[in-house]
Amino acid sequence: MQSIWNTLPRPFFALAPMEDVTDTVFRQIISSCAPPDIFFTEFTNVDGMFSDGAKEVIHRLIFSKKERPIIAQLWGGTPQNYYEAALVIRKMGFDGIDLNMGCPEKKVVKTGLCAALIKNHALAENIIRATLKGADGLPVSVKTRIGYNTIETEPWIRFLLSFPLAAITVHARTVREMSSVPAHWDEIKRAVDIRNEMKKNTLIVGNGDIASYSDGLSKSKICGADGIMIGRGIFKNPWIFDPHIQLSSLSARKKLNLLEKHILLFAKTWHNTKNFQIMKKFYKMYISDFPGASWLRTKLMEFDNPEDTLSYLRTYKEMTN
Ligand SMILES: Cc1cc2nc3c(=O)[nH]c(=O)nc-3n(C[C@H](O)[C@H](O)[C@H](O)COP(=O)(O)O)c2cc1C
């Protein structure tokens, strides 16, 4: 089976997995603006997938053909469930499986999972091996950080590279640093050097603070990363994966039209199964950097359903035409 990772351009650009942000709706919206070379789902708990509450987590694995290629990101604590999840994901037609070993949230690492696996190589190994077995040729990758309390790129990335992983995404901060310091891009270069020295085929994807397409290109050149992953940069510019679209060319009208499209697709996809409050997280992304933006954001916060929000938005657009 040809690995999707080997078909991507160099450097390739990925849209980062972001909980409660990069669901199927948001990915379709970004795809309609300028698609990245590869998408990831939000992290999905394998233990949840095989529990009575499966319905609560499985919506994270919904995707459409506009979001290809797409990698399912998993987390959890039971290797057997990673194996079972990999079987399901293969059947669903995903292009790969990514293992979350980077989430630093207190309530998650407290359970010894995600970024806490940096301190527990034995469990990390069991998870990787179980997933590789279930994936049966479907590429498996890992997204991680450069250490727990201190920078440990050398032992940790070397350890990960001892497995036949298709890619490792390196978010260049330690767990302790959360997002409070600039990403250490020199550590991504170090990961690339270790990979080259070990003569492995695993791709290295650099992640952390990329503000624009050109920023990603120049960072990949400097550190030699095969790919670049962008997370929060998408909030400043939904067209970030188009090298020709500049921030300054994004008019208020263009952004408001995109917000309208997002709300419509949110309502059509989720009906009433997802809380409309989630949609409000996106207002700053669409309603900013134009006169009256702050006022409009505050106004839209008053509405708790798609119908009222869309009705106000359309009236506003007509009045400001
Ligand atoms: C709201 C939010 C949710 C996130 N959820 C996930 C997730 O589900 N899985 C994951 O691996 N990383 C998650 N991350 C981390 C991002 O994928 C990325 O590594 C981080 O934001 C750094 O990249 P950036 O500086 O380009 O944003 C999340 C980040 C944010 C801001």
Image (cartoon, rainbow, N blue to C red):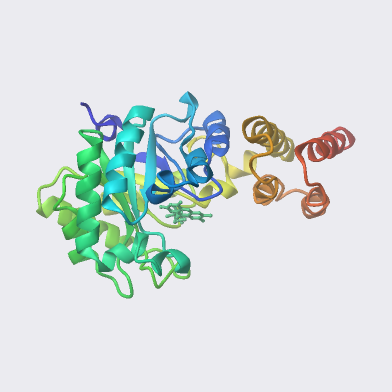
Image coordinates of residue 52 in percent, x first then y, are: 47, 46
- Residue ID at (37%, 38%): 71
- Residue ID at (64%, 40%): 273
Is residue 190 visible to the viewer in this orientation of the structure? no
Residue 130 vertical placement versus 239 (above, below): below
Q: Is residue 123 left or right of residue 27?
A: left
Residue 149 vertical placement versus 237 (above, below): below
Label total for image: 0
Judging depth in this view, the residue of 245 and 294 nearest the camera is 294
Judging depth in this view, the residue of 296 and 213 nearest the camera is 296
- Residue ID at (57%, 38%): 26
Q: Is residue 249 left or right of residue 100?
A: right
Image coordinates of residue 35 in percent, x first then y, are: 48, 32
Quarter occupied by residue 249: top right
- Residue ID at (10%, 54%): 197
Image coordinates of residue 30 in percent, x first then y, are: 54, 35
Looking at the rendered image, the quarter that the N terminus falls into is top left
Is residue 307 visible to the viewer in this orientation of the structure? yes
Q: Is residue 119 left or right of residue 241?
A: left
Q: Is residue 220 left or right of residue 263?
A: left
Quarter occupied by residue 174: bottom left
In the rendered image, the residue lying farthest to the bottom is: 149
Judging depth in this view, the residue of 19 and 232 nearest the camera is 19
Image coordinates of residue 37 in percent, x first then y, are: 39, 34
Looking at the rendered image, the quarter that the C terminus falls into is top right
